[in-house]
Amino acid sequence: MKLNSPHIPLGITFEDGLAILNTVSTAIERFEKDNEDFYQVSSNEFSCGFYVKNGFVSSTWYDDSLGRDSEEGINLKVTLYLQRYGDISDWEEGINNGWIQFFSNKKSGIGLAYGLHKDVIRFNQIGK
């Protein structure tokens, strides 16, 4: 299995984030969510985007259909996304509230919130 969505690193500038989204499509949508600006693109296989805080990418979001045909496929996809944002051995599984499974990587300062029912992924800078 290989991820087709682009990697959007946390902490990059807004302009660098837009350049990454442009590799998917020039039809970039802007939304305001929870008093934050959110930029999103879509393809036939996935949607992805990022939140901006003070001119920098503070969170990333992926709605990726890859692996949805099985629980094993979903688990592999989540693992591949975790590897994008740090060494897999540095990730710790956190609480699961029935809707969201949390992971944290204290070494990289990044957290993952995985939406169990909608199969969406959001990476956040921890403590920022």
Image (cartoon, rainbow, N blue to C red):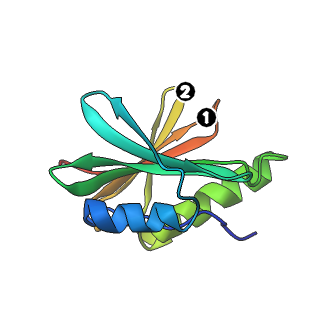
Q: Secondary structure at mark 2?
A: loop
**In the image, which disc is placed on residue 73?**
none
Q: Position of residue 18 (x, y in %)?
A: 39, 61
If you read the primary sequence from the N terminus, does the residue marked by circle 1 or circle 2 appear first? 2
Query: Is residue 14 found left or right of 38 in the rendered image?
Result: left
Left or right relative to 123: residue 12: left
Query: Amino acid under label 2?
Result: Trp
Density class for disc 2 (Cα within 10 Å; few <14, some 14-19, many ≥20) is: few
Tell me the crowding category of disc 1: few under 14, some 14 to 19, or many 20 or more residues within 10 angstroms, Cα based. Answer: some
Residue 80 % position (x, y): 60, 65
Q: Amino acid at mark 1?
A: Leu
The reply to whether residue 83 is visible in this rendering is yes
**C-alpha gap between disc 1 and disc 2:** 5 Å
Q: How many marks?
A: 2
Circles 1 and 2: CB atoms closer than 8 Å:
yes
Residue at point 54%, 68% (across, down) = 23
Q: Estimate the x, y position of residue 108 in percent, counting from the top left.
A: 30, 67
Q: Compare residues 89 and 74 and report the one nearer the observer.
A: 74
Q: Which label was assigned to residue 99?
A: 2
| Residue found at x 73% / y 53% | 45
Place residue 99 in its image quadrant: top right
Residue 61 seen: no
Q: Which of the image's four quarters has the N terminus?
A: bottom right
Q: Quadrant of residue 15?
A: bottom left
Reply above or below: 38 against 72.
above
Relative to 118, 127 lies left or right: left
As displayed, is residue 84 above or below residue 111? below
Q: Residue furthest left?
A: 54
At a point 44% along the width and 74% down the height, the residue shown is 87
> Which residue is label 1 attached to?
116
